[in-house]
Image (spheres, rainbow, N blue to C red):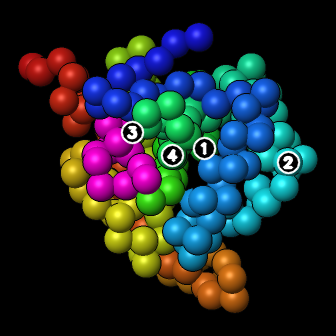
Amino acid sequence: MYAVALAPDAQLRPLEPWQAEEFLAHMDRAREGIDPFIPFAARNADLDAARATLQGYADRQAQDTGRIYGIWREGVLVGGAMFVHFDAAMGNCEIGVWSEPAGQGRGLVTAAVRALLGYAFEERGMQRAEWWSSTRNERSRAVAQRLGMRLDGTLRSYFPHNGVRHDKEVWSMLASEWPGAPRS
């Protein structure tokens, strides 16, 4: 197992099926803040669903098409980051995140995304990383902006959730824009 330090008291680590109970308890704490924007927490409302989500990402990791990581602060799972999509052949990926209140306001999500971007661009040779978020999710937009992503556009009335059609912003960063990219 490995861990990436995000702060003196926080780590980014793989989130695996055997951690389904911990993941479910975390989803229960995070649900209220996540559910207005995406169905991720609502889909993980019981142990079977939580286990299925983590197993699905384990399967996707084995196929090199997606991965999921947890953010632990002081030993407690408080958020996560994932490669929602990972297409090594095309050189494109999408990163997603979530957190509960105990994981917010400390820069942990931004640090986790920075770690995933570094992996995608520096280790895997990806050319484009995307970030999709509801236009109503100001915290998500702020992460994209802090990392220097560019707004590609807005998909109007793109996603129905909780009886509301959400507009989705698509942000991206290219390998050439990554701070670790070679300069000519």
- Mark 1 or 2, closer to the camera: 2
Q: Mark 3 points at which residue?
A: 113
Q: Residue 7 in the image: x percent, y percent?
A: 29, 31
* Secondary structure mostly taken by the magenta-highlighted segment of the chain: helix
Front residue of this view, candidates 3 and 95: 3
Could you tell me the amino acid type at mark 2? Leu
User: What quarter of the picture does the N terminus occupy?
Assistant: top right
Label 2, label 3: how far apart the Cα atoms are: 27 Å
Q: Nearer the viewer, residue 167 or 26?
A: 26
Task: Name the residue located 69 percent from the left edge and 40 percent from the top edge.
Answer: 22
Label 3 vs 4, first from the N-terminus: 4
Q: Can residue 67 be seen in this view?
A: no
Q: Name the residue under label 4.
A: 78
For mark 2, give the secondary structure.
helix
Q: Is residue 35 magenta?
A: no
Residue range corresponding to the magenta coloring: 102-112
**Residue 5 at x, y = what percent?**
36, 23
In the rendered image of this protein, does residue 145 appear above or below residue 158?
A: above
Mark 1 lies on residue: 84
Which quadrant would the C terminus be assigned to in this image? top left
User: Which three-letter amino acid code belongs to the residue tagged 1?
Assistant: Val
Residue lying at the far top of the rendered structure: 1
Expressed as whole percent of the image width and height from the top left, the position of residue 172 reads: 36, 49
The alpha-carbon separation of the residues under discs 1 and 2 comes to: 21 Å
Answer with left or right where residue 101 lies relative to residue 165: left
Q: Around disc 2, counting alpha carbons within 10 Å, would you say few (fewer than 14), some (14 to 19), or many (20 or more)? A: some
Q: Find out whether the residues at labels 1 and 3 contact each other: C-beta distance under 8 Å.
A: no
Sequence-earlier tag: 4 or 1 = 4
- Looking at the image, residue 25 sits to the left or right of residue 97; the answer is right
Identify the residue under disc 2. 47
